[in-house]
Each structure stands twice: as C-alpha cells, then as structure tokens.
C-alpha cells in the first residue's frame, strides 16, 4: 500500500525538488503542481508532489502518522518508525 504524505520543500531545481519527510531528504517531481516555493508543504505520492498543503494541516498529518507508527513499533518491539 502506498500513502501520500506531507513533505516540506527545501530546494527546487527546475521540476525536481528536495523535500524533507520527517527528517529524511528525498527528491520528488513538482511537475504536477504550479507556484510551489521553498518552505511549502506538499503531498507526495509515488515520487510526485500532487498538491500544496497548508503548514498546520501538514504538521497535524505528520503527527498523526508518527502516532500510528509509534503504536505499531510498540507492537513490533521497536521497529523503525520513520515515515
């Protein structure tokens, strides 16, 4: 199963952006959205930024995902809980 998750844009180079996903830096395509800028939060799915998200909603979603992973890690005896 694939999830679309919030990521913060930290660098833009043409149609590729570096994003921060819970401390992990990845590259994602921004060719599907317009007017994205450094500092924006975007929803990333399958390597593509698909929507711009306001910061409050992004942070709430990340916290919710972290809580799910923490609960699962407790069941799995401490597995990796990065998003």
Image (cartoon, helix red, strand yellow):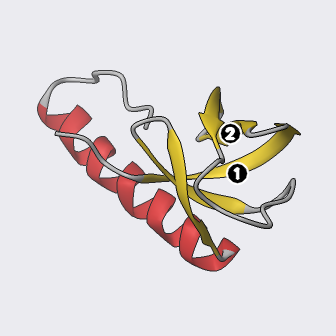
Residue found 87% across the figure and 53% down from its top: 38
Label 1 neighbour load within 10 Å: few <14, some 14-19, many 20+: many
Gap in angstroms between the C-alphas marked 1 and 2 = 5 Å
Residue found 65% across the figure and 28% down from its top: 27
Residue lying at the far left of the rendered structure: 75
Q: Are marks 1 and 2 in contact (CB under 8 Å)?
A: yes
State the SS at label 1.
strand
- Tell me the tag on residue 83: none
Which of 21/30 is in front?
30
Label 2 neighbour load within 10 Å: few <14, some 14-19, many 20+: some
- Tell me the tag on residue 20: 2
* Picture layout, residue 72 above or below residue 44: above
Side (left or right) of 70 relative to 26 = left
| Residue 13 sits in quarter | top right
> Which quadrant, please, contains the C terminus?
top left
What residue is disc 1 on? 8
Residue 63, horizontal then vertical, whole percent: 48, 60
Side (left or right) of 14 relative to 43 = right
In the rendered picture of this protein, how many numbered marks are placed on residues?
A: 2
Residue found 38% across the figure and 32% down from its top: 81
Residue found 28% across the figure and 21% down from its top: 79
> Which quadrant, please, contains the N terminus?
top left
Dot 1 or dot 2: first in sequence order is 1
Side (left or right) of 75 relative to 54 = left
Side (left or right) of 26 relative to 39 = left
Residue 73, horizontal then vertical, whole percent: 25, 33
* Picture layout, residue 14 above or below residue 26: below
State the SS at label 2.
strand
């Amino acid at each position: 199963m694939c999830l679309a998750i919030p990521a913060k844009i930290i660098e833009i180079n043409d149609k590729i952006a570096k994003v921060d996903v819970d401390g992990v830096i990845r590259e994602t395509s921004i060719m599907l959205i317009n007017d994205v800028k450094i500092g924006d939060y975007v929803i990333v799915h399958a390597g593509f930024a698909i929507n711009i998200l306001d910061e409050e909603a992004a942070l709430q979603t990340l916290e919710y995902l972290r809580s799910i992973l923490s609960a699962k890690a407790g069941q799995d005896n401490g597995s990796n809980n990065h998003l």
